[in-house]
Image (cartoon, rainbow, N blue to C red):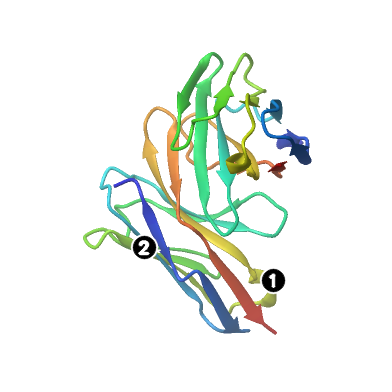
């Protein structure tokens, strides 16, 4: 019930393509859903996040789509660039006094020039 | 601001040795977290703290201990290192009431 399932494990797209990464969760108590971007040798950095009462959020070229009834959410990267090549993690957060974060397994994205 | 800093960057331990991974943040954040990241996997929460003197277990606390005597520091202790603890360890912090976590650069630990 605490798991967050992420797919695909890896993704290769051409420059300008729109990679889509999907995540699913089971615990309806999660109340915040961030996406993190991680470059090799670095810690994850917050990219964009959404709350479950919102169906879509856009920030620049990054969009989260959220389907509360299906308990699924996805990240879309518009006009992808080689610099977007990184590992992307979805996460789900439980507010337990602290913020208990459950991460997906990650998606390695490679954008071909 | 340096943000979240971690030391050491890399360490090799022998089975049964102990060590402390250091984590310091200069953002005056109340909440701090320790995660481990195994190859090809997401991050697993080990312990977290909502303030000085308060800590709680995450998903994978076995084999680790933490303390939080100040707002700035949140050290992670391995008492009897095991090969299964070979991983990259990340410390993170967040402000009270804010879900956004800021991560340190990580400590790579190899237990042989």
Q: Nearer the viewer, residue B99 or A14?
A: A14
Point out residue A87 in the picture as x, y percentages from the top left corner: 59, 63
Quadrant, the C terminus of chain B: top right
Mark 2 closeness class: few <14, some 14–19, many ≥20 residues within 10 Å: many
Q: Nearer the viewer, residue B91 or A113?
A: B91
On the question of residue B25 being in view, the answer is no
Quarter of the image holding residue B52? top right
Q: Which residue is mark 1?
A: A83
Q: Nearer the viewer, residue A62 or B92?
A: B92
User: Tag on residue B59?
Assistant: none
Residue at 61%, 51% in the rendered image? A44
Relative to A80, residue B3 above or below: above
Point out residue B74 in the picture as x, y percentages from the top left corner: 63, 25
Q: Which residue is mark 2?
A: A73
Q: Earlier in the sequence, mark 1 or mark 2?
A: 2
Quarter of the image holding residue B1? top right
On the question of residue A49 being in view, the answer is yes
**Chain ID for label 2?**
A
Residue at 58%, 48% in the rendered image? B37
Point out residue A69 in the picture as x, y percentages from the top left corner: 21, 60
Relative to B72, residue A4 above or below: below
């Amino acid at each position: 019930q605490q798991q967050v399932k992420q797919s695909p494990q890896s993704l290769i797209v051409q420059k300008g393509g729109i990679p889509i990464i999907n995540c699913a969760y089971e615990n309806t108590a999660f109340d915040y859903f961030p996406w993190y971007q991680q470059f090799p040798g670095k810690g994850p950095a917050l990219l964009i996040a959404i709350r479950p009462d919102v169906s879509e959020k856009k920030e620049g070229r990054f969009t989260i789509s959220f389907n509360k009834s299906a308990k699924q959410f996805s990240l879309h990267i518009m006009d992808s660039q080689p610099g977007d090549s990184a590992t992307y993690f979805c996460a789900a957060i439980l507010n337990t006094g602290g913020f208990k974060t459950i991460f997906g397994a990650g998606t390695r994205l490679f954008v071909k020039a | 601001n340096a943000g979240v800093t971690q030391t050491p960057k890399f360490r090799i331990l022998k089975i049964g040795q102990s060590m402390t991974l250091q984590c310091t943040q200069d953002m005056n954040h109340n909440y701090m977290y320790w995660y481990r990241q195994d190859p090809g996997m997401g991050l697993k929460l080990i312990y977290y703290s909502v303030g000085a003197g308060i800590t709680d277990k995450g998903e994978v606390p076995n084999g680790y201990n933490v303390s939080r005597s100040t707002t700035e520091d949140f050290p992670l202790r391995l008492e009897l290192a095991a090969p299964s603890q070979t991983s990259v360890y990340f410390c993170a912090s967040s402000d009270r009431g804010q879900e956004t976590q800021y991560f340190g650069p990580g400590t790579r630990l190899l237990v042989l």
